[in-house]
Amino acid sequence: MNRGSVLASTLLLLLVHSYFTTWLPLPALSSSKVYIVYMGEKEHDDPSMVTTSHHDVLASVLGSKEAALKSIVYSYKHGFSGFAAMLTEAQAEELSSLDGVVFVKPDALYEMQTTRSWDVVLGNISDQQSARLQQKAKFGQDIIVGVVDSGIWPESRSFDDSGYGPVPARWKGECQTGEAFNATSCNRKIIGARWYTGGVDPELLKGEFMSPRDHNGHGTHVASTIAGSPVRDVSYYGSGLAAGVARGGAPRARLAVYKACWGATVWCGGAALLAAIDDATNDGVDVLSLSLGGFQEFAGTLHAVARGVPVVFAGMNRGPAPQTVRNTAPWLITVAASMMDRSFPTKVVLGNNEELVGQSRYVDATVNTSEFLNLVHGFRCDNASLASVNATGKVVLCYAPEDVNINPPRQGFFNAISNVKKVGVRGLIFAGYSSNVLDKADSCNGVMPCVLVDFEIANRIAFYMINTRTPVVRISPATTVVGDWVLSPRIASFSSRGPSVEFPAILKPDIAAPGVSILAAVRDSYEFMSGTSMACPHVSAVVALLKSVHPEWSPAMIKSAIVTTASTTDRFGMPILAEGLPRKPADPFDMGGGHIEPDRAADPGLVYDVDPAEYTRFFRCTLDPKDDCSSYMGRLYQLNLPSIAVPDLVGSVTVSRTVTNVGPAEVTYRVAVEAPAGVDVSVEPTVMTFAVDASRNATFKATLTARQMVQGVYTFGSLAWSDDGGAHSVRIPIAVRSVIQDFVADVS
């Protein structure tokens, strides 16, 4: 078997593996279940006739039009041709053999994945110098952002439409009504709303609003982060914590809401998501934002991008382990989550007057903060440990560093809170390494203070307890600290890391943005949420602003502008760090091009564009790897992406890229390379000159040569084009792994 065939076979195996390990099959409602039937990239002159043709195809298998009408769940007719239907396995197999049917596969469930954050990303709204992009874009005025999520809470102050003009005439969507959501729930801010229950497990619908109204809060939080109108004097549950102005990054943009995600923990059915994307593409959205993970239905998103609609996805919350990033199709913008320059220090005073500091969201002003409480050591804080120390009515320290490998803080903190509540403690001090788990402390609200400390602080508390007959402690409410006192940005430990398991020659994630302790609208209040779900809308808003300033740019150009202008250093010029075990300098598998810099993205100098036909070829090869796909899928590093990833470097490889000048017509760029360790990189040409009345495109080739004949690991570098005036530096990340034996590698 030749190398190309091996790579194609491996890709297919990876896709199958990814399907069974990251997709959660819908619970069977009967012997039938929902299948998605894809019938190709067909343009329809009259989409209203397409549903009839889908019924005809289905009737040929089910035996009658009546059976087809009962079976079909959704008909996809705008971006592509296909449908979702309730089928048995045998019926699905028979359908897949029909002419015109490209594939049939079972539906799946997908998991959903601000006062300070926009000051960090775009600058203070009152600072005219630091809000350049927002001003150029008129704050996103009349850009329509489609949000596919859990719905919206229309009464939130963040969706006030005061001062808005008429709904853009190009809008073709609608405002679907339902439970607690009528025609007046839409306005000149929320210009459209749809909801999708077809194929969704009835268990997920229990207790839900059968309408676009948001029961969970996730969709409202995301939508307000993207386009929320400014709301002053907002804080965490009105406590004063994280106080400021809540606003979206594109506060004058319009919102189109597509509720396809349901339940208290928010799960989204693939068939419903495809229907939402299909409708949104036809309705006239300018940007699509999906804060969910592991979505493999490439058809819908590909056709949105082919129609000029950038699609932004969350990268998943499975970090810091490598190979956990999802949503890795090359036409998507995949977002990692970072921490911003805000923390919530909480003073812990011991009975010997030693003052220590942890982190919490403890804001209960009714508690007497001058009162010292008895302190006990709960060790791992399981039920047995707590029973042995009689923790009732006391503050308990949970400190078990020997368990950290089998009980990491994200799970350990959650378990500790649950266990100590059962025995009626007055407070919790939990020890763990930095892992961005403060959101778990929200369940302590109104019950007790729950404080996070590191192992060093916990050790000092334990030492005090050993040497004191009756140890006591006093916990003060949390305060807010912002600015240079807080090291930022840092990549959150939960943020999923590359490389992509599906397509290792496509570097993912693409970009990082704030996603930790983001304060945004939930129902009638404002709450914190963390995750790549919160980072995604930050990028979606920036995409909306760029779309306003550069309406002629393709989705690939917008993505390139964001990736190539990102920052790889913090405000002090030090490398951005990635939280994990241990904390380390962030690399492209942590943050892609780096941390988003919107003002620089508005004027990138050069961009890397991609013909959507190349995406289509890629998509077809993922469906059915034919002979002509073998070499193509093994050479994905030749796609004109703003990154270079070579997962199988043997000897040397030459990569070609074409840049388009979107800056001054007359300019000269020179290349600067930071070669990955163990790899030589040569570029030809090293100088590119653009002139008036000449082509605005230029092609260069980069040859990567392994300097060591060993079975390698990934190493990282970059390639940057800088103009002579110093106005532009266009940087792309490089990830290379040398391989001597196929399929024997180390990605850590």
Image (spheres, rainbow, N blue to C red):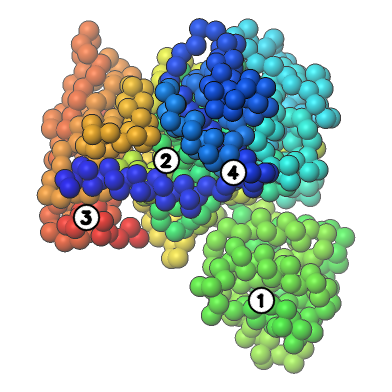
Inspect the image, locate mark 4, and give the three-letter code of the amino acid beneath it: Leu
Q: Residues within 10 Å of mark 4 (few under 14, many from 20)?
A: many
> What amino acid type is highlighted by mark number 3?
Asp
- Mark 1 or mark 4: which is in front? 4
Residue 676 seen in the figure: no
State which tag comes first along the sequence, 2 or 3: 2
Q: Which callout, 2 or 3, points to the residue nearer the camera? A: 3
Disc 3 crowd rating (10 Å Cα; few below 14, some 14-19, many 20+) is: few
| Residue 119 x, y percent position in the rendering | 58, 38
For discs 2 and 1, the disc positioned in front in the rendered view = 2
Which residue does the numbered mark 4 point to in the structure image? Answer: 109
> Which residue has dot 2 on it?
328
How much space separates mark 2 and mark 4, taking CA atoms?
Answer: 17 Å
Mark 2 residue element = loop
- Residue drawn at x 55%, y 77% is 403
**Residue 388 coordinates in the image, percent (x, y):** 74, 87
Asked if disc 1 and disc 4 are in contact, CB closer than 8 Å, the reply is no
Q: Nearer the viewer, mark 3 or mark 1?
A: 3
Mark 1 belongs to which amino acid? Cys
Which residue carries the number 1 mark? 398
Q: Is residue 375 left or right of residue 739?
A: right
Q: Which mark is residue 742?
A: 3
